[in-house]
Image (cartoon, rainbow, N blue to C red):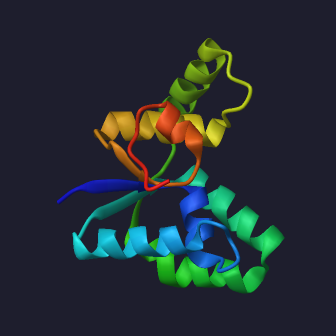
Amino acid sequence: MSTVFVDTSGVYALLVASDAFHGRARAAFEALRKEDARLVTTSYVLVESYALLGRRIGVDAVRRFRVDVAPLMEVIWVDRALHEDALDSLIARGATDVSLVDAVSFAAMRAGGVDRALTFDAHFVDEGFETPG
């Protein structure tokens, strides 16, 4: 069974029909379901996804994510060590266009040996991860 990391942009594209990547997100999600892929994400991605959906779409989208999508994912709860590792990496690279949420995602993926992500964020490709984008 393969493991795939789920990022905020993947969640948003999957749930929001007007998103430019919606069709690709649905196709990628269906393919992952067919291969019985293990889906993982971080608690930071959950927070970011809930905030983005709530702000742009509304509380019904938050509820739909919580009920229909979030239970399909194993959550890596960010602890102090993961947070600090990602923050150190972010500072060391001097990146201003990569968020702490993404840096935590990269660190969690590397720690877990995950090389694929359901995301449409080019930073994941820049980091060497496989995406449907």
Q: Is residue 118 left or right of residue 53?
A: left
Q: Is 89 situated above or below 59? A: above
Expressed as whole percent of the image width and height from the top left, the position of residue 119 reads 51, 54
* Position of the N terminus by quadrant: bottom left
Expressed as whole percent of the image width and height from the top left, the position of residue 63 reads 64, 83
Q: Is residue 78 visible?
A: yes
Q: Is 125 situated above or below 120? A: above
Task: Using the image as rendered, state which of residue 39 and residue 29 is in the foreground.
Answer: 29
Q: Is residue 78 left or right of residue 12?
A: left
Q: Is residue 76 left or right of residue 104?
A: left
Task: Using the image as rendered, state which of residue 94 and residue 123 is in the foreground.
Answer: 123
Expressed as whole percent of the image width and height from the top left, the position of residue 103 reads 56, 34
Image point 66% across, 77% down: which residue? 16
Expressed as whole percent of the image width and height from the top left, the position of residue 116 reads 36, 48
Image point 65% across, 36% down: which residue? 100
| Location of residue 54 (image quadrant) | bottom right
Image point 62% across, 42% down: which residue? 101
Image point 23% across, 71% down: which residue? 36
The tally of labels here is: 0
